[in-house]
Amino acid sequence: MDVDHPQSDQRWDRRARGETEVQRLDRNWNSLLQELRVVQTGVQLLTGFLLTLPFQQRFDQLGPPMRVVYLATVVCAVCATVLLIAPVAMHRMLFRRHRLQVLVSAAHRCAYAGLALLGLAVVGLTTIIFAAVAGRTVGLIAGACALPLFTFFWWVLPLMLRTHGE
């Protein structure tokens, strides 16, 4: 479904659910908020954890390549936090402005981008932790294993299920 041109979705909602466009937008917004509630706590904890790492004694043992991975991971986590909380701020700014369609569309995009960055942050953190415990090579292997898992379960499988149902 194209979030900006949901005509086929609207026709199905009217026929199968008896929903008006406003009811559909309300349902989509509430569904999106529920999804964001699930990930917000996790992304905030992850970001907080990452921000404390440089103050730990063993952080100095990370070599320059792993410090680059660490900084990239922090950037991904902070950006994911911003994007996954942004829909709440947008809602507050657009409250009572009758802009629900624009809000749902923008929040949908923020959620997509935020989840992608969250996945990259978890891959980066996996790399750093394995590198700290077992060495840089093992860390890179762990990150290389985590990346396709996130890619498959967060992107490929949902896209396959979406196109299979059409």
Image (cartoon, rainbow, N blue to C red):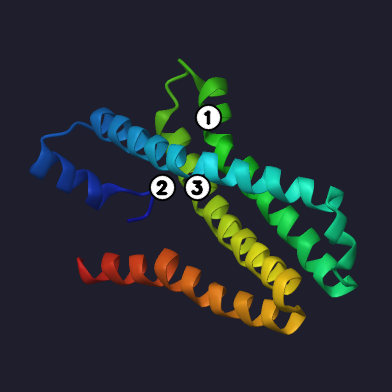
Going by the numbered disc 1, the residue's amino acid type is: Val
Q: Is residue 131 left or right of residue 58?
A: left
Work out whether mark 3 precedes mark 1 in sequence or the reverse, and give the earlier one: 1
Work out whether mark 2 precedes mark 3 in sequence or the reverse, and give the earlier one: 2
Name the one closer to the observer, 45 or 109: 45
Give the Cα distance between marks 2 and 1: 20 Å
Q: Position of residue 129 (x, y in %)?
A: 69, 66
Give neighbour class at mark 2: few <14, some 14-19, many 20+ (Cα, 10 Å): few
Numbered circle sitting on residue 42: none
Name the one closer to the observer, 52 or 31: 52
Q: Residue at x 47, y 73 (%)?
A: 149
Name the one closer to the observer, 10 or 125: 125
Front of the two marks 2 and 3: 3
Q: Residue at x 53, y 40 (%)?
A: 40
Give neighbour class at mark 3: few <14, some 14-19, many 20+ (Cα, 10 Å): many
Please say if 21 is above or below 132. Answer: above
Q: Position of residue 13 (x, y in %)?
A: 17, 42
Numbered circle sitting on residue 88: 1
**SS label for mark 3:** helix
Q: Is residue 78 visible?
A: no
Q: Position of residue 107 (x, y in %)?
A: 49, 40
Per the image, the residue denoted by label 3 is 111
Going by the numbered disc 2, the residue's amino acid type is: Asp
**SS label for mark 2:** loop
Going by the numbered disc 3, the residue's amino acid type is: Ala
Q: Position of residue 8 (x, y in %)?
A: 23, 52
Q: Is residue 41 left or right of residue 136?
A: left
Q: Residue at x 57, y 36 (%)?
A: 85
Name the one closer to the observer, 157 or 22: 157
Numbered circle sitting on residue 4: 2
Please say if 103 is above or below 131. Answer: above
Q: Quadrant of the C terminus?
A: bottom left
